Amino acid sequence: MTIIYLECGTTIRSSFNTGIQRVVRNIINNKKSIEDLSFVDECHLVEYVDQDFYILPKTTIAPDVVKADAVLRFLQSTNIFFKKKCNPHLHKIFKYILHGTYAELVNARIRWGHVKAAKKGRSELLKLNKHKTPSEAKKILILLDSSWHDDMWPRVSDFQKSGGFVYAVLYDLIPFSHPETVEITTRKLHTNWWRSAIKKLDGVVCISKAVQNELNEWQLKITHNKLPVDYFYLGSELNESDPVIKVLNTPSPFFLMVGSIEPRKNHSIVLDAFESLWLRGISGSLVICANNSWMSEELMERIKAHPQLNQQLFLVEKASDRDLVYLNKSCCALIMASIAEGFGLPIVEALQLGAKVICNDIPVFREIGEQNVTYFSFNNSHSLELLIEDHINQYLPTRELEKKWISWPESARMLGEKCLGLSIKNEVR
């Protein structure tokens, strides 16, 4: 008998829809695929809050809870900023005031959860360590979310002492390998959390073999104990159930970029290539879909002040899944120009919908895209420009691929299988 707990509290309290949140939502929406695995009897959703793990009810979190969490995160970031700007004595006072605010907000959030659960005829949120399980049951906690702001290690240790295994999903090591491309607060939270995690977990499941290889090299530098490591692949299908409500009406073939606007995504080199094409009179449009941006103020100004904006250059902010389905099915090709990624989710989403893909030539894109995508020379704007021109000349609206990527139910099942496999290795050890 095996019971699996999926930690997902950061995402369910957030309205963000960037890569990690999309992965978490798709995995928890397909947790039945984990429950259907042999020897898995139950799969529960868990959030870490108020210094403990809580098993979530099946209802969604109240909007007031989301608002409280947003304020809490703002106060945490303010505390980090204030620490840099004032003397230690003033910071102690400020921290004392904030500590009370943290407690009030967190308790309010838990109370809201209790009230909502009670209204639905459910009992109060249950602490993970109070969840009664048969003595022979194998318990696995999967840290699925980006909960790097949480010091959860005492409760992780308690879960392990009770006989459970704890595994974390690693999306990438970019804050370590390319720190200059990551916002400073996120970088510190991520790197500090993973330096602790590598010494306290029972294993790690990466989102690609490339990330697994990076982790195996990296963890030897951090600790002499080498954790069991495996990898799984992300799903690919987007939500096609709702009608498309936003359509870009451009007469020329368009190329699509999907992802946050940030330095490592390399939007500038793509825009350089298109500007060169436009100067030569070649018709082709660039559509940039981005829900967030950081460390890219100059690029955002360049895009929003561009003479081709809304003519051959389009910026789609807060794109929905149905927007992405339409755009992927209609585009000449998706372009992924990133200098570093843990996986490259837009690639498999585009392939699943029959789109052509052009990628920067980095190892993880070779691994994920294989022979199904076209690669341009690393960071070479002219190489990319030639490929774009070639795709325009050969453009066909749709095409069928011999190989399609896995679905999200298959991805969730693969994650469950890999964690079960790691738990067997841990028992042998």
Image (cartoon, rainbow, N blue to C red):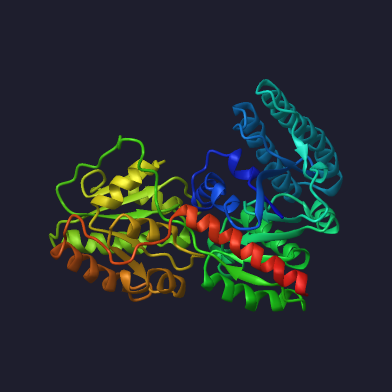
Q: Quadrant of residue 267?
A: bottom left
Q: Relative to 38, does residue 57 appear above or below in the rendering?
A: above
Quarter that holds the N terminus? bottom right
Q: Nearer the viewer, residue 232 or 150?
A: 232
Q: Is residue 211 left or right of residue 339?
A: right
Give the residue furthest to the top. 119
Query: Would residue 163 be visible to someone looking at this image?
Result: yes
Q: Quadrant of residue 393?
A: bottom left
Query: Would residue 305 be visible to someone looking at this image?
Result: no
Quarter that holds the C terminus? bottom right
User: Could you tell me residue 326's position as x and y percent?
Assistant: 29, 45
User: Could you tell me residue 338's position as x and y percent?
Assistant: 42, 65
**Residue at image coords 69%, 42%:** 78
Q: Relative to 427, does residue 94 appear above or below in the rendering?
A: above
User: Could you tell me residue 28's position as x and y percent?
Assistant: 56, 46
Q: Quadrant of residue 242?
A: top left
How many numbered circles are shown? 0
Q: Relative to 264, does residue 409 appear above or below in the rendering?
A: above
Q: Nearer the viewer, residue 368 or 288?
A: 368
User: Could you tell me residue 80's position as x and y percent?
Assistant: 72, 48
**Residue at image coords 77%, 76%:** 225
Q: Nearer the viewer, residue 223 or 418?
A: 418
**Residue at image coords 30%, 34%:** 245
